[in-house]
Amino acid sequence: MRKPLVAGNWKMFKLRAEAISLVKGIQDGLKGIDTGKVEVLVCPPYPWLEAVGSALRGSPILLGAQNAHEAKEGAFTGEVAVPMLKDAGCSYVIIGHSERRQHFGERGDRLHRKVRAVLEYGLKVIYCIGETLEEREAGRTEAVLERQIDEVLATDVDAARLVVAYEPVWAIGTGRTATTDQAQQAHVFIRGKLGGIFGLQVAQGLRIQYGGSVKPANAAGLLGQKDIDGALVGGACLAAGDFLAIIAAAVATAGGA
Ligand code: PGA
């Protein structure tokens, strides 16, 4: 059975004291939730990784980063390497988020290298894929997802440390969510593609998160879908109460997979 992964992508939000207070709020609220049924991850901005990591010590919440450079180290001003993130206590790195693709020009080849770097230096990866509104309206959703998978994922990727996040770009930060049917349909397609690469049995065990305006109000519907194995949450992860409600929805629907 796939254990859902609920991850908070804080993006470029929160100053230090706010970051600590958010994570303490999540920790407190988690005491009333059965955390054996869900994996919870927070991905704060780089400068707060250490502080949030220490605040989390002893709790089941995992720490992750929002991006990483593909080199082990080097003269790359302004960048952060995977071994540094590991040293700072991260267990996951998000790669290929649509904001990285859109604003920072990250594409197939670069993302291919980044995913391998994350795995090579010992962390787990959340690889994000998703179509734009224009692509969906042109009936190209599956072709886009297929390309984004084929460009980056192959048999040399350790599937045991891979999570895929389906994030339709038109649903990110817009308040517009994919319907449960649209999301489930995309997840089935993605799982089928992953089956073609890793084999059906491995694909059955791979977690595919949904992301894009996940909120307490729609979380149960989305997470209750058979092929949706957790959520990658942006806006709603910035308030402890909302994030906790999404985690609770994941726990309540876990076991349906
Ligand atoms: P959102 O962001 O929940 O604010 O739509 C999701 C994401 O970008 O991962």
Image (cartoon, grey):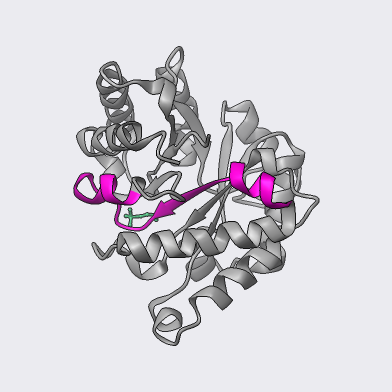
| 213 magenta-colored | yes
| 24 magenta-colored | no
> Residue at the spot x=64%, y=49% of the render?
203
Nearer-the-camera pick, 244 or 65? 244
Would residue 144 appear left or right of 69 to someone viewing this image?
left
Position above or below: 67 against 192:
above
Tell me residue 103's x, y (percent).
Answer: 48, 68
Would residue 71 appear left or right of 139 to someone viewing this image?
right
> Residue at the spot x=61%, y=70% of the render?
146
Q: Quadrant of residue 124?
A: top right
- Does residue 253 appear anywhere in the picture? yes
Answer with the quadrant where ligand 1 appears in the image.
bottom left
Q: Quadrant of the C terminus?
A: top left
> Residue at the spot x=63%, y=72% of the render?
147
Tell me residue 41's x, y (percent).
Answer: 45, 34
* First to last magenta residue range: 199-222
